[in-house]
Amino acid sequence: MQFDFTVIPPPETDMSEELAEALFEAGCDDCTPVVSNGVPLICFHREAANMHEAIRSAVADVQRAGCKVSRVLIEAEGIAGMMAGTK
């Protein structure tokens, strides 16, 4: 299954070409690093057995790239999908 969510690094994170390359090399070839309204975001479209595994592996990959993680944002559709998978 594919899961969509956003990893949010600290506000001072420089979303540079170097960070994008480090993310790719760390296994984040399924993400798009962007800055929206001055906020750095790493948007994921990750395949995994479940949402928990998708997020766990993405956070580990982002940290492996040398980037800190402040929080993870899951859209309402993703939460509904998580709930459907637990029934």
Image (cartoon, rainbow, N blue to C red):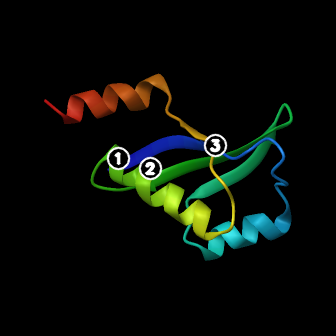
| Relative image position of residue 25 (x, y in whole percent) | 63, 76
Q: Label 3 is placed on what type of residue?
A: Ser
Q: Which of marks 3 and 1 is nearer the N terminus?
A: 1
Left or right of 20, for residue 73: left
| Quadrant position of residue 10 | top right
Q: Give the percent coordinates (x, y) of residue 69.
A: 62, 49
For badge 1, the amino acid type reads His
Q: Residue at x 71, y 52 (%)?
A: 33
Q: Residue 52 carries which label?
A: 1
* Residue ranking furthest to the left: 87
Q: How far apart are marks 2 and 1 (CA)?
A: 5 Å
Tell me the residue at 41%/32% (across/down). Answer: 78
User: Residue 11 falls in which quadrant of the image?
Assistant: top right
Q: Do the residues labelled 2 and 1 touch (CB within 8 Å)?
A: yes
Q: Determine contact: label 3, label 1, CB under 8 Å.
A: no
Asked whether the viewer can see residue 29, the reply is: no
How dense is the environment of label 3, judged by Cα within 10 Å: few (below 14), some, or many (20 and up)? few
> Which quadrant: the C terminus?
top left
Q: Residue at left 35%, top 44%?
A: 51
Instruction: Report the label total.
Output: 3
Secondary structure of the residue carrying tag 3 is loop
Dot 2 corresponds to which residue? 55
Mark 2: secondary structure = helix
**Residue type pointed to by label 2:** Ile
Kindly report which numbered mark, 3 or 1, lies closer to the viewer in this rendering. 3
